[in-house]
Each structure stands twice: as C-alpha cells, then as structure tokens.
Amino acid sequence: MKKTKIIFLILFLGFFYPFHSFSEIIKQKETTDENSNFNVFLDYSSGINSVVKKEFPEGSRFSVNCLNLEVRGKANDKISYRFTKQFIKKIDMENSDMLDLAYLKYKWNDKLDFLFGKQPFSFGSMEYSSGSSFYEHVYRYPHVYKKNKVHNYVGFSFIYHPIKNHEVQFQVINEMRSEEGNFVMQEINYPMGYSVNWNWSLKPNNDNDNDNDNDNDNYNDHDHDKIIKNRWSYSIFQENKKKKYWKLLALGSQLNWKPVTIEADYILSDEDIEKNRKLTHVLRSYISEYYEIASVKYGTYLVKLKYNFIPKWNLIAKGVYEIGSSKTGTGKLENDILGENKSFQKAYTYYGGIEFLPIIKNDDINFFLAYKNHRLNYSLDKIKKGNKNDHFIILGLNYRVKMI
C-alpha cells in the first residue's frame, strides 16, 4: 500500500509541479534545450467534449484527445533521429503500428540532408504542417487527407537547401503493408509514392538564425520569427490497381504580422480510387449491383486567423470550404445517380476559439475553449439523407511535458 501511495505521489508531483512557478519552467527550459543529443516529450490533451448531431445533443463527456510519446535528438553532428508513438488512436483490423514515426536524418553537408525510415508525408500546405503539431490539433480539419487509416509510410527523402530559408524535398515511399487487407484483390502489393515539396520563408533582416539546421519535422522553434512561410507540394501515389493513382496538390502560405497571423491553403485531391470510401458506401446502399469504388476529386480551401489581442490570450477563427465532384459515373448501370464530372457534395466547416497561454512565447501548455460546426450537403437528391450539420464544443488543455 505504501509503495502505491509513493508511486501516485511521484506521478502527481511530476505532472503538476511545473504549474507552481512559470519562471522556473522557463529557466529550466532554457537550460535543457541547450542539450540536443537526447530529448523525450510527452504530449497530453484532455477536455470536456459536447456534441450535437442533426440537432440532437449527444451530451458531454470527459475524454483524452491526445497522448503521444516522442524521442528525438542527435547521435552526432551528422546524424539526428526521431521516434514517436501515438497511444490514442483507432486500432486497425489487424494491429496498430509499433511506431508512428521512426527515421534517421543524415546531414551530408550544409546544402544536403538525407532522411531514412518511417517518415511523415512530404505534403505542402499550412494545414498539414500544423496538423502534426501538438498545439494545433484542436483546429485541424480532419477530412483534408481522405485516408481511412492515417499511418505514415517507409522510404527515403533527400532535402536540398539551395539558399538560406529555402528547402526542396524529394520523397519516395511505400506502405509497409497493404491497406486493404484480404478483402480486395491486389494487383500491386507495395505501391510507391513520390512527392516534391518546396518550403521557403522570409525573416526580418536582423534575424541571423540558419534554417538549414531545421529537422524538417514541423518543430522549428524559430517559426514564430518568420514573416512569410510557404509550403507547396505535388504528390503522386500508385494505387493497388494498375493505372490507378492518387494525385495531390497542396499549396499553403502564412503571413505572420504580429499580433495577427493569417494562413491560407488550397488542396486538390484527385483520386482514381476514393480514399475514404464514403461516397462508395453511399452508392452501394442505393445500388445493390454496384461493386466498383468511386473515382472522385476534392478541392479544399482553408483560411485561418489568429489574433494575439493581449499577452497570453489568442482568438482563433477558421473557415473551410470543400467541393467534391465525380470523375466517372456508376458505369453502364441503369440507375446512374452519380454521373460523370458532376458535383456531388459541398462541405462547410467553421471554427472559433479562445486560448490562454500561461507562459508568454511558450506554447508547451495552453487552455482552450473551441467550437466547430461541420456542414455536409450532398447535391444529388437520392443521397441527401446523408447531409450533416454537426456542432462540437471542447473545453480543455494541451500539455507538452519535456521528460528528459
């Protein structure tokens, strides 16, 4: 019994001790950040979630929204590493992946880096860049990348820095295992994907930091000093069937004009085989003899505004507009309710929130109140019963603990 009490006491002090003195946190952070050889972080997000779907409240509940363990650092001047494991996520039909990220980065010289292992997609847009950031996950649009199972691929990347604050990345990756399992005939077991990404930014003239030391993992501590940031990419992925591809264009820019930050994105997803199968399931519910998978395009526009109206307090507003169109109809079936090159859905999503950061210029801990309204309107009369008008309210906290 005594051992149990001691363990709980240690956990309690380890979690809540940082709250007692924010000045001590800052001093400790400045000291520990100097050692980049080995760092261990624990990301934790929890809150009270309230949901209203189709005008019917589903009540409020406490939930843990995120629990993520990250290990990163440098083995020497040439080699750095990053390993992450997300514990709160949906489990696949077989088993969850052991690690969500596991890669090594080798610095060839000041101009060229190589990345090996299980790594994040080299997608552009501020939405994808901020989506992998623990701090921004509450305001991420979850439908922007249309995959049923969001797991990273294994492969190789090389990153070229032609001039200061510019970065060009070429990535070649493939899945560790088939996404479809044993339910669909596979013509290609391990399809390859290719991405070209150009990231560049502008900084004040008096900023002497060198971005070439950035690990390209969206955890750059100097991002707040950049006036303009751009993340542009084009990707093409071979599907499990021959001559079928997923093509993705992602363009994103950010203007950081303190105290206001504005982000704008455009993402075009061209899918010969629908990634999330949502439209396919709707079509099969109406057409029993439809056995194909829909071929679609999604165009998504995102705008986000963050206003630091007083120190430690931020207001956030975000809007998303998405339009989905068919590339082909339902074939030669008599009941072709889809048609070719027709718009079948429009989606509108609105975010609003307020945040409190106890430590100025440090977002390791923040408290937030966020609201989200997601509206999905199908254009085709026969599938309009799938329309949605959902509301979400979250009151919670994000806490990034530097354990080592």
Image (spheres, grey):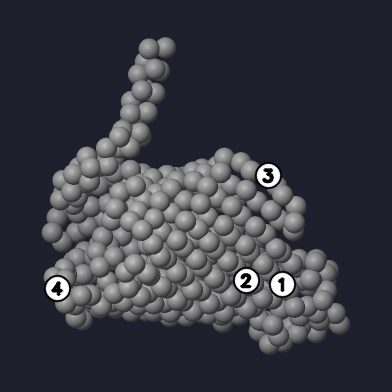
Name the residue type under label 1.
Answer: Asn
The disc, 2 or 4, on the residue closer to the chain's N-terminal end is: 4
The disc, 3 or 2, on the residue closer to the chain's N-terminal end is: 3
Instruction: Return the residue at label 1.
Output: 377
Name the residue type under label 3.
Answer: Gly
Q: Nearer the viewer, residue 267 or 321?
A: 321
Label 3: element kind: strand
Instruction: Return the residue at label 4.
Output: 206
The disc, 4 or 1, on the residue closer to the chain's N-terminal end is: 4
Instruction: Return the residue found at the far front.
Output: 310
Label 2 and label 1: CA atoms lie apart by 9 Å
Instruction: Return the residue at label 2.
Output: 348
Whether label 2 touches label 1, CB < 8 Å: yes
Q: Quadrant of the N terminus?
A: top left
Instruction: Return the residue at label 3.
Output: 59
Whether label 4 touches label 1, CB < 8 Å: no
Q: Name the residue: 37% across, 69% down.
A: 260
